[in-house]
Amino acid sequence: MTDSTLLTSSYNFHLPDGLIATHPASPRDSAKLLVYNRKTDKITHAIFSDFEKFIPQNCALIFNNTKVIKARLFGHKPSGGKLELLINRPLNAKDVSVYIRGKVKVGTQIFFDEDLVAVVKELNEDGSRIVNFYLSSPSSQAPAWELKSLHFEDILPIIEKIGHVPLPPYIQREDNKEDESEYQSVFAKNEGAVAAPTASLHFTPAQHKKVCERFEHAYVTLHVGSGTFKPVEVETITDHPMHSEYYDISPRAKELLDSDTPILSIGTTSTRTIEFYARHPYKTKGEANLFLHPNNKPLRVNHLLTNFHLPKSTLLMLVASFIGVDKAQKLYAEAIKEKYRFYSYGDAMLIL
């Protein structure tokens, strides 16, 4: 008989539509904060502006300083047919994993503003496509071999001009000017994510500065891919193919992780990075595909700040790796009862 903590159905719950946050809290630190202390089994309802009061003494904070790129692009085929392309992640210098809304085949050219062209290289069974990007001469629809090949870093300034903020699908609205700043942490630095590390979105510049002055801290980079939103569709969670994301651990973060300093991880993305490193202690950069769940518990992270996540998601399973699936369900039921806002622009939970 399968352990119930490994059944995907154990991570399902009903969320009223009205609790899905479609816009950010304003100001950022006015979001609600549910604090759960595992030692005392006590729940405290607070506001994120009070976050600093709950941080354990002698604790170090680890932030993810990835920066969200404008990964959603609208283009057209030579025939004029419109297509939408969502960048998922670079696979190497030139091959980029994307999702395309609209029919394409190997060799299809997709034309965007600023003379950017994508050429479909492979169609994958999981629905993703691999493309290469090129720069064409103005008004030219030349064959691929006459186009100038671009590395991934070459397209970043172009998509900053023509792309759209890749809001998660459950927000169900078009992005706007506000999202360009709000769907980005105040300490975002290294470009490459297509989804924000959402626990970080609650920090104002003043609050981030204040906690960093008071507590030891460091930064890791995990470029969050769209796989972070992929629901678990298998019956047993351990059969789920976990997505991979690029990570880089700064020298200061490595120093803290190699010490015995208690760690407060700011978000699930920082947690995945830290815990991958805990299992591969000599590897400070590369690809991380760690799946945390109740049968694969954290080894290094002591405390977690996170948002409230989708049913049947690997993120909810990560939360359960800290507190168990039954307690996770009880805390989520409490949050729903108290009308906390859920998902990327929603409220926060601190697990101590």
Image (tube, rainbow, N blue to C red):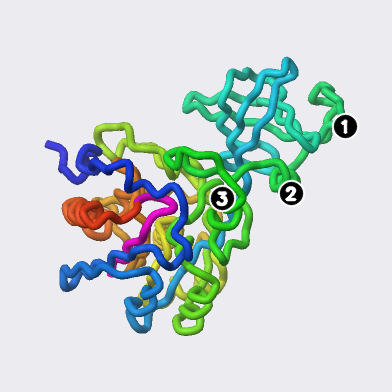
Q: Residue 276, how many percent across, how many down? A: 42, 57
C-alpha distance separating marks 1 and 2: 17 Å
Q: Is residue 162 above or below residue 256?
A: above
* Residue type pointed to by label 2: Pro
* Residue type pointed to by label 3: Ala
Between disc 3 and disc 2, whose residue precedes?
Answer: 2
Q: Are marks 1 and 3 in contact (CB under 8 Å)?
A: no
Quick check: 40 left or right of 75?
left
Q: Which residue is mark 1?
A: 137
Q: Which residue is mark 2?
A: 157
Q: Secondary structure under badge 1?
A: loop
Between disc 1 and disc 3, whose residue precedes?
Answer: 1
Q: Is residue 325 magenta?
A: no
Disc marking residue 193:
3
Looking at the rendering, the stretch of residues picked out in magenta corresponds to 342-352
C-alpha distance separating marks 3 and 2: 14 Å
* Residue type pointed to by label 1: Ser
**In-front residue for pair 178/280:** 178
Q: Residue 318, how many percent across, how many down? A: 32, 53
State the predominant SS element of the stretch in magenta: loop
Q: Secondary structure under badge 3?
A: strand
Q: Who's the residue at 66% across and 26% down the image?
A: 121
Q: Secondary structure under badge 2?
A: helix
- Classed neighbour count for the residue bearing mark 2: other residues with Cα under 10 Å, few (<14), some (14–19), many (≥20): few
What is the quadrant of the N terminus in the image? Answer: top left
Quick check: 278 left or right of 180?
left
